[in-house]
Amino acid sequence: MERIAALVHLGCAKNLVDSETVVAQLINMGYSMTSDPAEASLIVVNTCGFLQSAVEEAIDNILELSRYKDAGVCEQLLVIGCMVQRYGKKLLPLLPEVDVFVGTSYYQNLGDIHPFQPPPGAQRLWLGRPGNLSDSRTPRIRSTPFYSAYLKIAEGCNNRCSFCLIPQLRGPLRSRPVPDIVAEASQMVAEGVVEINLIAQDITAYGCDRDDRMQLVQLLEALESLQGLAWVRLLYAFPGRITDSLLTTMAQSQKIVPYLDLPIQHCVPGILQAMHRGGPLPNYEKLAERIRMLLPEVALRTSIMVGFPGETDADFGELLRFVERVQFDHVGVFRFSPEAGTRAARLSGQVPDEIKQQRYHQLLELQRTISGKRLQRWIGQTLPVLIEGFHPETELLLAGRMPAQAPEVDGIAIITKGVSHPGEIRSVRITAAADYDVIGELVDFRTEPSLLREIP
């Protein structure tokens, strides 16, 4: 009987890479993959455990998927990932529907655990201290479009922010060697990838576990020589470790797009100290000015947390004024969640949920206006756009992304005229801008047949 598996992925891009390695292992075990859990004899759920809301989402998904076992279609239900690493033994009586639980330390060892249906009384929980690190030899089946990929350059984190469980879930910082990363990037390019998004819990910490703070620059210089690679994007860069050498390398590169994701979390010194953001706190306004001086075309993205314990109305007012002054291109806003096991959950001055909600919407509304204003500067310019295919809502338009737009989080470029193939980088003249998207036309029209029909 054919063995069919379905993987349900929950969580961030870093977790997505782990899901891709899981799929490769399942295929090596003889499973064929399906996107429909109703067809699967094995269902795998890769969970997020960073926030309680993510845990609740994971449990809801698990309970919903467990009905396929009741229907007799699914024979085995496997739950893996950060939620398992966080809660461990507590999950065993809570979710008896699950056959096996696997923590983050066993992602790469599913073959040792298979079959995933232990007899009564046998081990159901596989948990250990996170210390594994994938490399270029780790089997992986990418789930992103053929032209774009995430490349995880390190695992774990040493920052110890007071609100964050990542060091517990993922372990200490572990950086991959530069040659190994370049080897994986070379394989990606050979498979048609033109955009590589470098990810880690903190990419600017890359190499610090080896006492080499220049390793990120060395990696970027090595990637510069890869023929066929067009764009390299830096995601999750800790602002306190943005150096002039990094910015100079970016400015001189032909491949690194002018884009930086700097999760600052807040601007008020007292709150940043309570967050334990680590080391001397930079002046974020001066940092933004310095980045823009060296990279005039740069798009800056950040993450901001509202409602951290002790945040007063005055603090939030200062945060609004700060965001107004700096004019980030993209901002992700999050409400503080008092996660059990973090120091921040035990702090006094917890902010009521209704106030968090008000501040969340107020900051989002401010940033919506700023984002639209920032996009106006591209009108009239001709920019490279990575074509992704039809617009998600209509086949009368094409969609893509400018260098200023990361996958899935920053809006899109809507193309109203021209013909192209997915994965091509084409010149687009920007004609208009909305709150989060830009609109434009291909400037080098084509008349030959294409995978995409001509736009009238």
Image: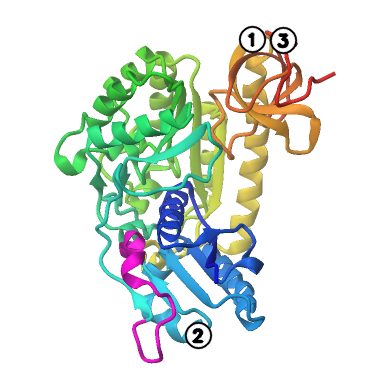
Q: Earlier in the sequence, mark 1 or mark 3?
A: 1
User: Mark 3, mark 2: which one is toward the viewer?
Assistant: 3
Mark 2 is on which residue type? Pro
**Identity, as a three-letter code, of the amino acid under mark 3:** Phe
The N terminus is located in which quarter? bottom right
Above or below, 289 against 358 in this view is: above
The residue beneath circle 1 is: 381
The span picked out in magenta is 104-123
Residue toward you, 288 or 169? 169
Which class describes the residues within 10 Å of circle 2: few (<14), some (14-19), or many (20+)?
few
| CA distance separating discs 3 and 2 | 59 Å
Spot occupied by residue 295 in the image (x, y as percentages of width and height): 43, 16
User: Which amino acid type is shown beneath numbered disc 1?
Assistant: Gln
Q: Nearer the viewer, residue 28 or 395?
A: 28
Relative vertical location of residue 432 with respect to residue 332 in this rendering, above or below: above
Front residue of 28/287: it is 28
Q: Residue at x 63, y 10 (%)?
A: 382
The outermost residue toward the right is: 456
* Whether residue 334 can be seen here: yes
In the displayed image of the protein, which residue is found farthest to the left? 211
Q: Position of residue 113 (x, y in %)?
A: 34, 72
Residue 246 screen position, x and y as percent: 31, 23
Residue at disc 2, secondary structure: loop
Q: Label 3: few (<14), some or many (≥20) within 10 Å?
A: some
Q: Which of marks 2 and 3 precedes in the sequence?
A: 2
Q: Nearer the viewer, mark 1 or mark 3?
A: 3
Disc 3 target residue: 445
Q: Secondary structure at mark 1?
A: loop
Quadrant, the C terminus: top right
The quarter of the picture where residue 100 lies is bottom left
According to the image, label 2 marks what residue? 96
